[in-house]
Image (cartoon, rainbow, N blue to C red):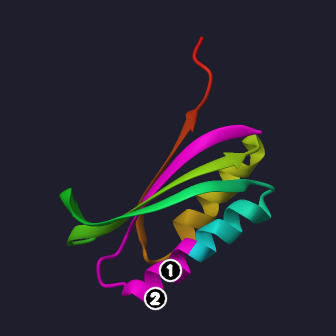
Amino acid sequence: MREYELTYIVHPQVDAEGLTAVIDEVKRAVESTGGVVHKVEPWGLRRLAYPIRKVREGQYVFMQVGLEARGVAELERVLKLKEPILRHLIVRIGEEE
């Protein structure tokens, strides 16, 4: 199992309960692919560098997860289908050579 950092931006009009629901959905998506969520950090509302879908702010969420390689593709597919998620980025972390 490899370690990854997942950062995603949620639409700013999503309220606190909605944000919690989105975070829970992403956790379930990670766990359904056989992964493990190690850490979840909501970073709050921040200004975007450029507009995305005519939106200038977003609620950032950072997660550290453990996934198998095949689980990353499935997780990316699920994140693309989530309407409130504007953008996402998955980066592999681990041992340096």
The residue under label 2 is which amino acid type?
A: Glu
Residue at point 76% right, 45% down?
Answer: 70
**What span is in magenta?**
1-23
* Residue farthest toward the top in the current orientation of the protein: 97
Asked whether disc 1 touches disc 2, contact meaning CB atoms under 8 Å apart, the reply is yes
**Residue 3 in the figure: left or right of residue 53:** right
Extreme right residue here?
Answer: 34
Residue 27 point in image, percent of width and height: 64, 67
- Between 84 and 3, the one lying in front of the other is 3
Q: CA distance from mark 1 to mark 2?
A: 5 Å
| 70 shown above or below 8 | above
Residue 20 — which label? Answer: 1
Q: Is residue 18 magenta?
A: yes
Q: Residues within 10 Å of mark 1 (few under 14, many from 20)?
A: few
Does 64 sit above or below residue 55?
A: above
Total residue callouts: 2
Quarter placement of the N terminus: top right
Q: Position of residue 74 (x, y in %)?
A: 70, 56
- The residue drawn where x is 36% and y is 87% is 15
Rendering coords of residue 60 (x, y %)? 36, 63
Asked if residue 4 lies left or right of residue 10, the reply is right
Which residue is more in the foreground, 64 or 69? 64
| Residue named by callout 2 | 17
Secondary structure under tag 2 reads helix
- At numbered mark 1, what does the secondary structure look like: helix, strand or loop? helix
- Residue at 62% x, 60% y is 77
Q: Is residue 51 above or below residue 13?
A: above
Amino acid type at circle 1 is: Thr
Residue drawn at point x = 68 percent, y = 66 percent: 29
